[in-house]
Amino acid sequence: MTEEVKRLRCVVADLIGENERLKTELAKANELLSKSQDVFCEWDMDYFPIYEEIGLYLNEEEDE
């Protein structure tokens, strides 16, 4: 196997690892967003539109 192929395999493995890390971070961000929305509902506080925008952004990234 040539050195170039070995390097490419390493790059692909790194990208797969980074993708998995990003998926985990996205799931955590969605969970935090959901929890914060629940807290605002429990406290009878107004819903802030920014949470909707953040949720749309997070889910848009998830679809790609």
Image (tube, rainbow, N blue to C red):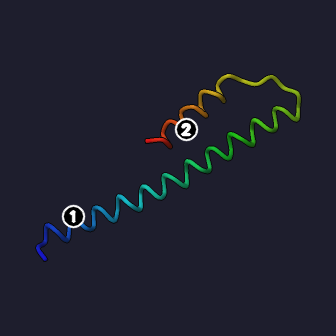
Going by the picture, which residue comes out furthest to the bottom? 1
Answer above or below: position of 51 versus 38: above
Q: Residue at x 71, y 41 (%)?
A: 34
The amino acid beneath tag 1 is Leu
Q: Residue at x 55, y 47 (%)?
A: 26
Judging by the rendered image, the residue that carries numbered circle 1 is: 8
Which quadrant holds residue 37?
Answer: top right
Which quadrant holds residue 12?
Answer: bottom left
Q: For the N terminus, give its image quadrant.
A: bottom left
Circle 1 residues within 10 Å: few <14, some 14–19, many ≥20: few
Q: Describe residue 51's horizontal placement relative to residue 57 as left or right.
A: right
Upstream in sequence: badge 2 or badge 1: 1
In the image, which disc is placed on residue 58? 2
The alpha-carbon separation of the residues under discs 2 and 1 comes to 30 Å
Q: Position of residue 49 (x, y in %)?
A: 67, 22
Q: Nearer the viewer, residue 59 or 43?
A: 59
Q: Secondary structure at mark 2?
A: helix
Q: Secondary structure at mark 1?
A: helix
In the image, which disc is placed on residue 48? none
